[in-house]
Amino acid sequence: MYLLLLPNNFTLLQEIESHSSFLIMYKKNPELLEKIRQQFKTAPYPRVDLETTPKNNWEALYLHSLVTPYYLRNQKVISTEGKVILDAGCGTGYRSLVLALANPGAKIIGIDLSEEAIDLARKRLEYHEIDQTEFQVLSIEEVGQLGQEFDYINVDDVLYLFEDITVGLNALKSVLKRQGILRANLHSELQRTSYFRVQKVFKIMGLMDEVPGELEIEIARDTMRNLKDDVVLKTRAWSLDLEQDDERILMNYLFVGDKGYTIPELFAALKQTDLEFISMLNWRHWELTDLFKTPDDLPTFLALSLPETSLEEKLHLFELLHPIHRLLDFWCGHTDDRESFRAIAQWTDRDWEQAQVHLHPQLRTPQVKGDLLESISSHQPFDISRYIPLPTTVPIFLESDFAACLLPLWDGVQSVSTLVQLWLKLRPLDPITLESVSYEMAASDIKSLLMRLESLLYVLLERSS
Protein backbone atom coordinates (compact mmCIF):
# COMPACT_ATOMS: atom_id res chain seq x y z
CA MET A 1 0.00 0.00 0.00
CA TYR A 2 1.33 3.43 -0.92
CA LEU A 3 1.70 5.87 1.95
CA LEU A 4 -0.01 9.19 1.50
CA LEU A 5 2.87 11.12 3.06
CA LEU A 6 6.19 11.57 1.33
CA PRO A 7 9.60 12.08 2.98
CA ASN A 8 10.32 15.77 3.61
CA ASN A 9 6.87 16.70 2.31
CA PHE A 10 5.57 18.66 5.26
CA THR A 11 3.11 20.78 3.36
CA LEU A 12 0.96 17.71 2.85
CA LEU A 13 1.71 16.53 6.36
CA GLN A 14 0.32 19.77 7.71
CA GLU A 15 -2.83 19.42 5.62
CA ILE A 16 -3.45 15.85 6.76
CA GLU A 17 -2.62 16.52 10.40
CA SER A 18 -4.97 19.51 10.41
CA HIS A 19 -7.90 17.26 9.52
CA SER A 20 -8.55 15.02 12.51
CA SER A 21 -11.57 13.48 10.80
CA PHE A 22 -9.37 12.42 7.91
CA LEU A 23 -7.44 10.28 10.35
CA ILE A 24 -10.71 9.05 11.87
CA MET A 25 -11.57 7.56 8.48
CA TYR A 26 -8.55 5.29 8.80
CA LYS A 27 -9.17 3.95 12.29
CA LYS A 28 -10.08 0.64 10.68
CA ASN A 29 -6.61 0.57 9.20
CA PRO A 30 -4.33 1.11 12.22
CA GLU A 31 -1.24 0.25 10.18
CA LEU A 32 -1.78 3.18 7.83
CA LEU A 33 -2.69 5.48 10.72
CA GLU A 34 0.54 4.57 12.50
CA LYS A 35 2.57 5.21 9.35
CA ILE A 36 1.02 8.66 9.07
CA ARG A 37 1.88 9.42 12.66
CA GLN A 38 5.41 8.05 12.41
CA GLN A 39 6.06 10.00 9.23
CA PHE A 40 4.90 13.19 10.88
CA LYS A 41 7.39 12.75 13.72
CA THR A 42 10.28 13.29 11.32
CA ALA A 43 8.80 16.41 9.71
CA PRO A 44 9.91 20.01 10.44
CA TYR A 45 7.72 22.84 11.71
CA PRO A 46 4.58 23.71 9.69
CA ARG A 47 4.52 25.25 6.26
CA VAL A 48 3.36 28.36 8.08
CA ASP A 49 6.56 29.18 9.92
CA LEU A 50 6.49 29.32 13.69
CA GLU A 51 7.34 33.03 13.58
CA THR A 52 4.54 33.94 11.16
CA THR A 53 1.78 35.97 12.74
CA PRO A 54 -1.72 36.68 11.35
CA LYS A 55 -1.99 39.96 13.25
CA ASN A 56 -2.09 41.95 10.00
CA ASN A 57 -4.40 39.53 8.22
CA TRP A 58 -7.45 41.76 8.64
CA GLU A 59 -9.95 39.48 6.94
CA ALA A 60 -8.92 36.33 8.86
CA LEU A 61 -9.20 38.13 12.20
CA TYR A 62 -12.52 39.70 11.21
CA LEU A 63 -14.04 36.34 10.23
CA HIS A 64 -12.63 34.43 13.21
CA SER A 65 -13.86 36.95 15.75
CA LEU A 66 -16.85 35.80 17.80
CA VAL A 67 -18.04 39.41 17.66
CA THR A 68 -18.89 39.13 13.95
CA PRO A 69 -21.36 36.19 13.93
CA TYR A 70 -22.78 37.09 17.34
CA TYR A 71 -23.73 40.55 16.08
CA LEU A 72 -25.17 39.12 12.87
CA ARG A 73 -27.37 36.82 14.91
CA ASN A 74 -28.37 39.07 17.81
CA GLN A 75 -27.51 42.67 16.85
CA LYS A 76 -25.50 42.88 20.05
CA VAL A 77 -21.80 43.35 20.68
CA ILE A 78 -20.25 40.65 22.81
CA SER A 79 -17.01 40.82 24.77
CA THR A 80 -14.60 37.95 24.09
CA GLU A 81 -13.02 38.28 27.54
CA GLY A 82 -13.41 34.99 29.42
CA LYS A 83 -15.01 33.14 26.51
CA VAL A 84 -13.97 29.55 25.75
CA ILE A 85 -13.27 28.61 22.14
CA LEU A 86 -12.75 25.14 20.67
CA ASP A 87 -10.59 24.62 17.60
CA ALA A 88 -11.68 21.16 16.47
CA GLY A 89 -9.08 19.51 14.24
CA CYS A 90 -6.55 22.20 15.14
CA GLY A 91 -3.56 20.53 13.47
CA THR A 92 -0.35 22.41 14.19
CA GLY A 93 -2.15 25.39 15.62
CA TYR A 94 -2.04 28.23 13.10
CA ARG A 95 -5.81 28.70 13.11
CA SER A 96 -5.73 28.45 16.91
CA LEU A 97 -3.36 31.42 16.84
CA VAL A 98 -5.77 33.32 14.58
CA LEU A 99 -8.62 32.59 17.00
CA ALA A 100 -6.55 33.76 19.96
CA LEU A 101 -5.61 37.06 18.32
CA ALA A 102 -9.14 37.66 17.01
CA ASN A 103 -10.72 37.05 20.43
CA PRO A 104 -8.69 38.81 23.14
CA GLY A 105 -9.12 37.35 26.61
CA ALA A 106 -10.63 34.08 25.37
CA LYS A 107 -9.30 30.65 26.23
CA ILE A 108 -8.43 28.49 23.23
CA ILE A 109 -8.78 24.70 23.43
CA GLY A 110 -7.52 22.69 20.47
CA ILE A 111 -8.07 19.01 19.74
CA ASP A 112 -6.54 16.77 17.11
CA LEU A 113 -5.78 13.08 16.74
CA SER A 114 -2.08 13.63 16.17
CA GLU A 115 0.10 13.94 19.26
CA GLU A 116 2.86 15.50 17.16
CA ALA A 117 0.52 18.13 15.72
CA ILE A 118 -0.73 18.97 19.22
CA ASP A 119 2.85 19.37 20.42
CA LEU A 120 3.59 21.81 17.60
CA ALA A 121 0.37 23.70 18.29
CA ARG A 122 1.45 24.18 21.91
CA LYS A 123 4.85 25.45 20.78
CA ARG A 124 3.30 27.84 18.29
CA LEU A 125 0.99 29.48 20.84
CA GLU A 126 3.78 29.61 23.43
CA TYR A 127 6.10 31.29 20.91
CA HIS A 128 3.51 34.01 20.33
CA GLU A 129 3.02 34.35 24.11
CA ILE A 130 -0.58 33.18 24.10
CA ASP A 131 -1.01 31.57 27.49
CA GLN A 132 -4.74 30.86 27.79
CA THR A 133 -4.56 27.66 25.76
CA GLU A 134 -5.04 23.94 26.15
CA PHE A 135 -4.37 21.25 23.56
CA GLN A 136 -5.41 17.60 23.74
CA VAL A 137 -5.12 14.54 21.55
CA LEU A 138 -8.77 13.78 20.90
CA SER A 139 -11.14 13.03 18.02
CA ILE A 140 -14.18 15.16 17.27
CA GLU A 141 -16.49 12.28 18.15
CA GLU A 142 -14.88 12.15 21.60
CA VAL A 143 -15.14 15.88 22.27
CA GLY A 144 -17.58 15.27 25.13
CA GLN A 145 -14.67 13.87 27.13
CA LEU A 146 -13.44 17.42 27.61
CA GLY A 147 -16.32 17.94 30.04
CA GLN A 148 -16.76 21.52 28.87
CA GLU A 149 -19.11 23.65 26.81
CA PHE A 150 -17.94 26.31 24.38
CA ASP A 151 -18.96 29.82 23.40
CA TYR A 152 -17.52 29.34 19.92
CA ILE A 153 -16.44 26.26 17.98
CA ASN A 154 -14.26 26.41 14.89
CA VAL A 155 -14.05 23.32 12.68
CA ASP A 156 -12.26 24.30 9.49
CA ASP A 157 -11.73 22.09 6.40
CA VAL A 158 -12.69 18.98 8.35
CA LEU A 159 -16.42 18.30 8.22
CA TYR A 160 -16.61 17.28 4.55
CA LEU A 161 -14.29 14.34 5.24
CA PHE A 162 -16.83 12.64 7.52
CA GLU A 163 -18.76 9.81 5.93
CA ASP A 164 -21.85 11.46 7.44
CA ILE A 165 -21.47 15.15 8.22
CA THR A 166 -24.32 15.02 10.75
CA VAL A 167 -22.10 12.86 12.97
CA GLY A 168 -19.59 15.68 13.27
CA LEU A 169 -22.28 18.33 13.65
CA ASN A 170 -24.06 16.41 16.41
CA ALA A 171 -20.81 15.83 18.32
CA LEU A 172 -19.93 19.51 18.24
CA LYS A 173 -23.48 20.61 18.99
CA SER A 174 -23.38 18.54 22.19
CA VAL A 175 -20.65 20.79 23.62
CA LEU A 176 -21.91 24.12 22.23
CA LYS A 177 -23.38 26.52 24.79
CA ARG A 178 -27.00 27.56 24.28
CA GLN A 179 -25.97 30.98 22.96
CA GLY A 180 -22.81 29.59 21.35
CA ILE A 181 -21.89 29.73 17.69
CA LEU A 182 -20.42 26.99 15.51
CA ARG A 183 -18.39 27.73 12.39
CA ALA A 184 -17.91 24.89 9.89
CA ASN A 185 -17.53 24.38 6.16
CA LEU A 186 -18.05 21.89 3.36
CA HIS A 187 -16.42 21.53 -0.03
CA SER A 188 -18.65 22.92 -2.77
CA GLU A 189 -19.77 20.27 -5.23
CA LEU A 190 -20.40 22.85 -7.95
CA GLN A 191 -17.20 24.84 -7.55
CA ARG A 192 -15.02 21.71 -7.41
CA THR A 193 -16.85 19.73 -10.05
CA SER A 194 -13.82 19.66 -12.37
CA TYR A 195 -11.60 18.36 -9.55
CA PHE A 196 -14.13 15.65 -8.71
CA ARG A 197 -14.15 14.63 -12.39
CA VAL A 198 -10.35 14.40 -12.33
CA GLN A 199 -10.58 12.25 -9.20
CA LYS A 200 -13.01 9.91 -11.00
CA VAL A 201 -10.57 9.61 -13.91
CA PHE A 202 -7.75 8.66 -11.58
CA LYS A 203 -9.97 6.24 -9.68
CA ILE A 204 -10.68 4.45 -12.97
CA MET A 205 -6.94 4.38 -13.62
CA GLY A 206 -6.43 2.75 -10.21
CA LEU A 207 -4.41 5.63 -8.77
CA MET A 208 -6.64 5.84 -5.70
CA ASP A 209 -7.08 2.14 -5.00
CA GLU A 210 -4.56 2.62 -2.23
CA VAL A 211 -3.47 5.83 -0.53
CA PRO A 212 -1.69 7.81 -3.28
CA GLY A 213 2.05 8.29 -3.10
CA GLU A 214 4.92 9.62 -5.18
CA LEU A 215 4.29 7.29 -8.13
CA GLU A 216 0.59 8.21 -8.34
CA ILE A 217 1.45 11.90 -8.20
CA GLU A 218 3.80 11.59 -11.16
CA ILE A 219 1.30 9.53 -13.17
CA ALA A 220 -1.41 12.12 -12.48
CA ARG A 221 0.89 14.97 -13.46
CA ASP A 222 2.06 13.19 -16.63
CA THR A 223 -1.54 12.40 -17.62
CA MET A 224 -2.76 15.99 -17.27
CA ARG A 225 0.34 17.44 -18.87
CA ASN A 226 0.01 15.27 -21.98
CA LEU A 227 -3.66 15.92 -22.65
CA LYS A 228 -4.27 18.23 -25.60
CA ASP A 229 -4.62 21.82 -24.44
CA ASP A 230 -8.18 22.08 -25.74
CA VAL A 231 -9.45 19.04 -23.84
CA VAL A 232 -12.23 20.43 -21.67
CA LEU A 233 -11.12 18.87 -18.38
CA LYS A 234 -7.59 20.19 -18.84
CA THR A 235 -8.81 23.71 -19.58
CA ARG A 236 -10.87 23.71 -16.39
CA ALA A 237 -8.71 21.80 -13.92
CA TRP A 238 -5.07 22.20 -14.93
CA SER A 239 -2.72 25.15 -14.74
CA LEU A 240 1.01 25.68 -15.08
CA ASP A 241 1.40 26.49 -11.39
CA LEU A 242 0.39 22.88 -10.66
CA GLU A 243 3.33 21.58 -12.66
CA GLN A 244 5.68 21.22 -9.70
CA ASP A 245 3.16 21.34 -6.86
CA ASP A 246 2.86 17.83 -5.40
CA GLU A 247 0.69 19.00 -2.52
CA ARG A 248 -1.98 20.61 -4.69
CA ILE A 249 -2.12 17.55 -6.93
CA LEU A 250 -2.68 15.34 -3.89
CA MET A 251 -5.18 17.61 -2.19
CA ASN A 252 -7.23 18.17 -5.36
CA TYR A 253 -6.70 15.33 -7.87
CA LEU A 254 -5.90 12.44 -5.53
CA PHE A 255 -7.66 13.54 -2.33
CA VAL A 256 -8.93 10.37 -0.67
CA GLY A 257 -12.32 10.88 1.00
CA ASP A 258 -13.00 14.23 -0.71
CA LYS A 259 -16.70 15.00 -1.17
CA GLY A 260 -18.70 17.99 -2.30
CA TYR A 261 -22.01 19.41 -1.13
CA THR A 262 -24.62 21.93 -2.27
CA ILE A 263 -26.53 24.56 -0.33
CA PRO A 264 -29.69 22.36 -0.10
CA GLU A 265 -27.59 19.51 1.33
CA LEU A 266 -26.04 21.89 3.85
CA PHE A 267 -29.44 23.13 5.00
CA ALA A 268 -30.76 19.56 5.14
CA ALA A 269 -27.90 18.56 7.46
CA LEU A 270 -28.60 21.53 9.73
CA LYS A 271 -32.27 20.62 9.86
CA GLN A 272 -31.45 17.00 10.68
CA THR A 273 -29.18 18.07 13.55
CA ASP A 274 -31.58 20.77 14.75
CA LEU A 275 -29.10 23.59 14.16
CA GLU A 276 -30.06 27.03 12.92
CA PHE A 277 -28.25 28.63 10.01
CA ILE A 278 -26.93 32.09 10.90
CA SER A 279 -24.98 33.27 7.88
CA MET A 280 -22.37 32.38 5.33
CA LEU A 281 -18.95 33.30 6.67
CA ASN A 282 -18.22 35.64 3.77
CA TRP A 283 -21.87 36.64 3.41
CA ARG A 284 -21.10 39.82 1.49
CA HIS A 285 -19.74 37.65 -1.34
CA TRP A 286 -23.01 35.70 -1.63
CA GLU A 287 -25.34 38.52 -2.66
CA LEU A 288 -27.53 37.27 -5.49
CA THR A 289 -28.36 40.72 -6.86
CA ASP A 290 -24.65 41.47 -7.30
CA LEU A 291 -24.62 38.97 -10.19
CA PHE A 292 -26.79 41.24 -12.34
CA LYS A 293 -25.63 44.21 -14.38
CA THR A 294 -28.14 46.53 -12.74
CA PRO A 295 -28.97 45.26 -9.24
CA ASP A 296 -31.48 48.07 -8.77
CA ASP A 297 -33.32 47.12 -11.95
CA LEU A 298 -33.62 43.33 -11.92
CA PRO A 299 -35.52 41.31 -14.52
CA THR A 300 -39.22 41.68 -13.79
CA PHE A 301 -39.91 38.09 -12.72
CA LEU A 302 -36.92 38.03 -10.36
CA ALA A 303 -37.73 41.45 -8.92
CA LEU A 304 -41.27 40.29 -8.11
CA SER A 305 -40.33 36.88 -6.73
CA LEU A 306 -37.15 37.72 -4.82
CA PRO A 307 -38.90 39.20 -1.74
CA GLU A 308 -40.68 35.87 -1.24
CA THR A 309 -37.60 33.75 -1.90
CA SER A 310 -36.06 32.04 1.15
CA LEU A 311 -32.44 32.61 2.12
CA GLU A 312 -31.65 28.99 1.28
CA GLU A 313 -33.08 29.42 -2.22
CA LYS A 314 -31.18 32.68 -2.76
CA LEU A 315 -27.90 31.04 -1.77
CA HIS A 316 -28.64 28.04 -3.96
CA LEU A 317 -29.42 30.30 -6.92
CA PHE A 318 -26.12 32.07 -6.35
CA GLU A 319 -24.11 28.84 -6.35
CA LEU A 320 -25.91 27.61 -9.47
CA LEU A 321 -25.27 30.86 -11.33
CA HIS A 322 -21.80 31.66 -10.01
CA PRO A 323 -20.03 28.77 -8.19
CA ILE A 324 -16.84 30.58 -7.24
CA HIS A 325 -16.53 29.56 -3.58
CA ARG A 326 -14.44 26.45 -2.80
CA LEU A 327 -16.08 26.23 0.59
CA LEU A 328 -19.64 26.50 1.77
CA ASP A 329 -18.42 28.26 4.89
CA PHE A 330 -21.13 28.99 7.45
CA TRP A 331 -22.06 29.89 11.02
CA CYS A 332 -24.85 28.11 12.88
CA GLY A 333 -26.18 27.69 16.41
CA HIS A 334 -28.86 26.06 18.50
CA THR A 335 -32.37 26.63 17.22
CA ASP A 336 -34.59 29.13 19.06
CA ASP A 337 -31.58 30.84 20.68
CA ARG A 338 -31.57 33.90 18.44
CA GLU A 339 -32.37 37.03 20.44
CA SER A 340 -35.22 39.08 19.02
CA PHE A 341 -34.38 42.58 17.89
CA ARG A 342 -35.81 45.40 15.83
CA ALA A 343 -34.19 45.76 12.42
CA ILE A 344 -32.22 48.99 12.07
CA ALA A 345 -34.35 49.99 9.08
CA GLN A 346 -37.32 50.04 11.48
CA TRP A 347 -35.70 52.12 14.23
CA THR A 348 -37.57 55.17 15.46
CA ASP A 349 -35.96 58.56 16.05
CA ARG A 350 -35.87 57.69 19.75
CA ASP A 351 -34.05 54.41 18.97
CA TRP A 352 -31.41 56.35 17.06
CA GLU A 353 -31.07 58.98 19.75
CA GLN A 354 -30.30 56.33 22.39
CA ALA A 355 -28.29 53.91 20.25
CA GLN A 356 -24.66 53.04 20.93
CA VAL A 357 -22.03 52.85 18.17
CA HIS A 358 -19.14 50.37 18.28
CA LEU A 359 -16.25 50.12 15.89
CA HIS A 360 -15.64 46.52 14.81
CA PRO A 361 -12.72 45.30 16.99
CA GLN A 362 -10.62 44.34 13.96
CA LEU A 363 -10.63 47.97 12.80
CA ARG A 364 -9.75 49.34 16.21
CA THR A 365 -6.00 49.10 15.81
CA PRO A 366 -3.16 51.66 15.98
CA GLN A 367 -2.39 51.14 12.31
CA VAL A 368 -5.94 51.85 11.13
CA LYS A 369 -6.18 54.84 13.46
CA GLY A 370 -2.87 56.15 12.13
CA ASP A 371 -4.10 55.84 8.55
CA LEU A 372 -7.31 57.62 9.53
CA LEU A 373 -5.43 60.51 11.13
CA GLU A 374 -3.26 60.87 8.06
CA SER A 375 -6.34 61.08 5.83
CA ILE A 376 -7.90 63.68 8.10
CA SER A 377 -4.79 65.83 8.33
CA SER A 378 -4.25 65.72 4.56
CA HIS A 379 -7.96 66.25 3.82
CA GLN A 380 -7.98 63.09 1.73
CA PRO A 381 -10.77 60.49 1.57
CA PHE A 382 -10.29 57.55 3.94
CA ASP A 383 -10.47 54.09 2.31
CA ILE A 384 -12.06 52.06 5.09
CA SER A 385 -12.58 49.04 2.83
CA ARG A 386 -8.87 48.38 2.44
CA TYR A 387 -8.81 46.52 5.75
CA ILE A 388 -11.73 44.15 5.17
CA PRO A 389 -12.27 43.07 1.54
CA LEU A 390 -15.65 43.62 -0.08
CA PRO A 391 -17.46 41.73 -2.86
CA THR A 392 -16.75 44.61 -5.19
CA THR A 393 -13.55 46.11 -6.50
CA VAL A 394 -14.94 49.59 -5.83
CA PRO A 395 -13.42 50.85 -2.55
CA ILE A 396 -15.49 52.47 0.18
CA PHE A 397 -14.20 55.98 0.78
CA LEU A 398 -15.22 58.37 3.55
CA GLU A 399 -14.85 62.11 3.19
CA SER A 400 -12.21 63.41 5.58
CA ASP A 401 -14.88 65.28 7.62
CA PHE A 402 -16.91 62.10 8.06
CA ALA A 403 -13.71 60.23 8.94
CA ALA A 404 -12.97 62.84 11.61
CA CYS A 405 -16.46 62.40 13.01
CA LEU A 406 -15.79 58.68 13.50
CA LEU A 407 -12.42 59.22 15.19
CA PRO A 408 -13.83 58.96 18.77
CA LEU A 409 -14.81 55.34 18.03
CA TRP A 410 -11.14 54.40 18.26
CA ASP A 411 -11.28 55.48 21.91
CA GLY A 412 -14.41 53.53 22.75
CA VAL A 413 -18.17 53.19 22.36
CA GLN A 414 -20.00 56.39 21.44
CA SER A 415 -23.65 57.35 21.43
CA VAL A 416 -25.24 58.44 18.17
CA SER A 417 -26.12 61.78 19.73
CA THR A 418 -22.44 62.37 20.59
CA LEU A 419 -21.46 61.81 16.98
CA VAL A 420 -24.22 64.14 15.81
CA GLN A 421 -22.94 66.90 18.09
CA LEU A 422 -19.41 66.38 16.77
CA TRP A 423 -20.69 66.53 13.20
CA LEU A 424 -22.34 69.88 13.93
CA LYS A 425 -18.95 71.21 15.06
CA LEU A 426 -17.12 69.80 12.04
CA ARG A 427 -19.68 71.04 9.50
CA PRO A 428 -21.78 73.79 11.07
CA LEU A 429 -22.74 75.29 7.73
CA ASP A 430 -24.37 73.77 4.68
CA PRO A 431 -21.60 73.90 2.02
CA ILE A 432 -24.12 74.93 -0.67
CA THR A 433 -26.50 77.36 1.07
CA LEU A 434 -24.03 78.44 3.78
CA GLU A 435 -26.92 78.30 6.23
CA SER A 436 -26.53 76.82 9.69
CA VAL A 437 -27.05 73.06 9.81
CA SER A 438 -29.88 72.04 12.14
CA TYR A 439 -29.58 69.17 14.58
CA GLU A 440 -32.15 67.23 12.53
CA MET A 441 -30.08 67.66 9.35
CA ALA A 442 -26.90 66.57 11.13
CA ALA A 443 -28.70 63.57 12.64
CA SER A 444 -29.89 62.56 9.17
CA ASP A 445 -26.33 62.73 7.81
CA ILE A 446 -24.93 60.61 10.64
CA LYS A 447 -27.80 58.13 10.38
CA SER A 448 -27.10 57.62 6.67
CA LEU A 449 -23.38 57.21 7.32
CA LEU A 450 -23.86 54.68 10.12
CA MET A 451 -26.43 52.64 8.20
CA ARG A 452 -24.02 52.38 5.28
CA LEU A 453 -21.12 51.30 7.50
CA GLU A 454 -23.26 48.94 9.58
CA SER A 455 -24.42 47.10 6.45
CA LEU A 456 -20.76 46.18 5.97
CA LEU A 457 -20.17 45.61 9.71
CA TYR A 458 -17.48 48.27 9.92
CA VAL A 459 -19.54 49.70 12.76
CA LEU A 460 -21.96 47.83 15.03
CA LEU A 461 -25.11 49.49 16.32
CA GLU A 462 -26.83 48.56 19.57
CA ARG A 463 -30.32 49.74 20.38
CA SER A 464 -30.88 50.54 24.07
CA SER A 465 -33.36 48.24 25.77
Image (cartoon, helix red, strand yellow):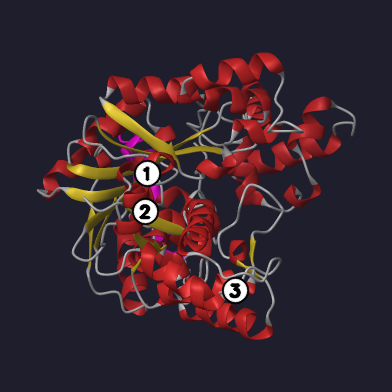
Numbered disc 1: secondary structure: loop
Identify the residue at image location x=42%, y=62%.
Answer: 360
Judge from the rendering whether residue 26 lies leftward or rightward of residue 337; answer left or right: right
Residue that mark 2 sits on:
352
Write down the region rendered in magenta. 22-43
Between 236 and 379, the one lying in front of the other is 379
Magenta residues, dominant SS class: helix
Are circles 2 and 1 on residues that touch, CB within 8 Å?
A: yes
| Residue 240: % across, % down | 80, 48
| Residue 97: % across, % down | 38, 66
Is 380 drawn above or below residue 157 in the view shown? below
Identify the residue at image location x=24%, y=30%.
Answer: 335
Identify the residue at image location x=58%, y=42%.
Answer: 285
Is 66 drawn above or below residue 284 in the view shown? below
Q: CA distance from mark 1 to mark 3?
A: 26 Å
Residue that mark 3 sits on:
401
Label 3: few (<14), some (14–19) or many (≥20) C-alpha neighbours in 10 Å: some
Magenta run includes residue 282: no
Numbered disc 3: secondary structure: helix
What kind of residue is marked 2? Trp
Label 1: few (<14), some (14–19) or many (≥20) C-alpha neighbours in 10 Å: few
Judge from the rendering whether residue 244 lies leftward or rightward of residue 246; answer left or right: right
Numbered disc 2: secondary structure: helix
Q: Is residue 166 visible?
A: yes
Residue 347 disc label: 1
What kind of residue is marked 1? Trp
